[in-house]
Amino acid sequence: PQEEIYPEVFVLADFADTGSLREAVSSVIRKAPFRKMMTPIGHYTGIPLTNCGKFGWVSDIHGYRYLSKDPQTNGPWPAMPEIFSTLASSAAEQVGYPGFKPDACLINCYELGTKLNAHQDKNEKDFSWPIVSVSIGLPAVFQIFGKKREGKPFNYQLHDGDVMVWGGKSRLIYHGVKTIKPDNQNPSLQQRINLTFRKAG
Ligand code: MD3
Ligand code: FE
């Protein structure tokens, strides 16, 4: 089932088989472990992250950008697993963006009690490509603020296996993730992993 929850923001509920995605995430983090990164204002990103694919999103005292090498090893990021790229392309195609071949996958690892403040994503070269994101593990309330950071957001709960596609005029909206809470139906779950697929280069 496909739903347009906000102009040009699509949710494909329970679209992904997260069991096999988890195995692929494990193989990526063996080569490029999750890490917090320094931000330009001298704090650490609250959310540990890593990347796979040709380009990886990084933050340091100089700012945010995409790099073709992991700054911790100086080698390339792990290759994007085939099931990642296939999933991202088919989700994009499903909602009307054929030919999407992501060259960057950012993997965020949210622990209980962490959140992602409202922000825009604008480090990519070409905003005409969509962004595809996949939720794994704990549920999360995703927030859409719109063109401005302030005001009352539109909230949408995401679950394990849900895939979102952001295209067109939704590409530059402010968005965030509310504090991650335990799932009473699934008390053993301790994390939410989010995959974000982009065309960065
Ligand atoms: C809407 N991550 O890494 S993914 C991020 O759940 C980020 O980890 C969130 O926002 C997460 O930058 C949300 C969905 C997403 C990603 C990029 C977007 C939504 C977006 C770019 C523009 C608009
Ligand atoms: Fe974002």
Image: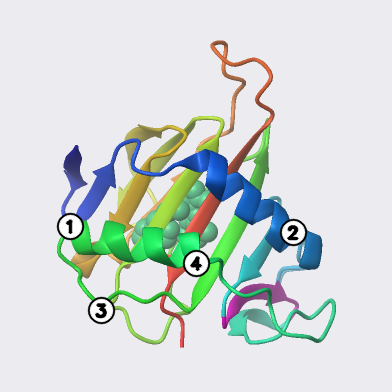
Q: How dense is the environment of label 2, judged by Cα within 10 Å: few (below 14), some, or many (20 and up)?
A: some
Tell which circle, 3 or 2, labels the residue nearer the N-terminal end: 2
Residue 110 % position (x, y) = 65, 42
Question: CA gap, disc 1 to disc 2?
Answer: 30 Å
Q: Is residue 132 above or below residue 151?
A: below
192 vs 127, left or right, is: right
Going from N to C along the chain, the mark reached first, 4 or 2, is 2
* Dot 3 amino acid type: Ser
Q: Please tell me which residue lies in front, 61 or 98.
A: 98
Characterize the magenta stretch by its predominant secondary structure.
Answer: strand
Q: Which mark identifies residue 95?
A: 1
Q: What is the secondary structure assignment of the residue under circle 4?
A: helix
Q: In this orientation, which residue lies closer to the viewer: 80 or 144?
A: 80
Q: CA distance from mark 3 to mark 2?
A: 30 Å
Classify 10 Å Cα crowding around label 3: few (below 14), some (14-19), many (20 and above): few
First in residue order: circle 4 vs circle 3: 4
Q: Nearer the viewer, mark 4 or mark 2?
A: 4
**Does the CB distance between marks 3 and 1 fall below 8 Å?**
no
Look at the image and give the residue range highlighted in magenta.
54-61
The residue that disc 2 covers is 29
Classify the position of the N terminus by image quarter: top left
Q: How much space separates mark 4 and mark 2, taking CA atoms?
A: 16 Å
Q: Are marks 1 and 2 in contact (CB under 8 Å)?
A: no
**Front position among marks 3 and 1:** 1
Q: Do tag 3 and tag 2 residues touch (Cβ < 8 Å)? A: no
The residue at which mark 4 appears reads as 82
Residues under labels 4 and 3: Cα distance?
Answer: 23 Å
Numbered badge on residue 128: 3
Tell me the amino acid under the disc marked 2.
Ile
- Return the disc, 4 or 1, that comes first in the chain's sequence: 4
Instruction: Work out how far the residue at label 4 is from the one at label 1, CA to CA, in angstroms.
Output: 21 Å
